[in-house]
Image (spheres, rainbow, N blue to C red):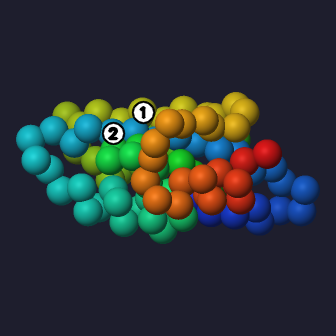
Amino acid sequence: MELPTRATTKGSEMAIFAVTYDLIKGKDYERLWTELERLQGHKALASFYLLNLDIDDTPTLKNHLKMFVDADDLLMVVKVEGRPSFVKAKAGTTDWINQNCP
């Protein structure tokens, strides 16, 4: 299943998601990173991405991303309600929030 990265239907709503993960035993992060980048996610912290997608529910995104992690890895997907706020984050985070969040 391939997720759309931008609104594809007239009038469709975008939703902001936070994705965080712990890959156990030094696993291969590259598969997950590549998919998060394909989805145009922004890496705000070491293991924390923000995504703006044309879906509206966390189970859909979680089920999609679990294809890129192993069974013993940890993965959490949260739908963001409201504008994210932070003290410090990786470069570009303020710009990403300004462009993607109301």
Q: Is residue 99 left or right of residue 35?
A: right
Q: Who is closer to the viewer here, 89 or 99?
A: 89
Q: Mark 1: few, some, or many residues within 10 Å (few <14, many ≥20)?
A: some
Spot occupied by residue 65 in the image (x, y as percentages of width and height): 42, 48
Q: Who is closer to the viewer here, 64 or 5?
A: 5
Q: Quadrant of residue 96?
A: bottom right
Q: Residue furthest left?
A: 25
Spot occupied by residue 2 in the image (x, y as percentages of width and height): 53, 62
Q: Is residue 38 left or right of residue 52?
A: left
From what the image shows, is residue 100 above or below residue 66? below
Q: Residue furthest front?
A: 87
User: In the drawing, what numbered circle is on residue 52?
Assistant: none
Spot occupied by residue 99 in the image (x, y as percentages of width and height): 71, 59
Spot occupied by residue 71 in the image (x, y as percentages of width and height): 23, 37
Label 2 – label 1 distance at C-alpha: 6 Å
Q: How many marks?
A: 2
At x 46%, y 59%, the residue is: 91
Asked if the residue at tag 1 contacts the one at tag 2, i.e. Cβ–Cβ closer than 8 Å, the answer is yes
User: In the drawing, what numbered circle is on residue 76?
Assistant: 1
> Which amino acid, mark 1?
Met
User: In the drawing, what numbered circle is on residue 21?
Assistant: 2
Q: Is residue 16 left or right of residue 78?
A: right
Q: Secondary structure at mark 2?
A: strand
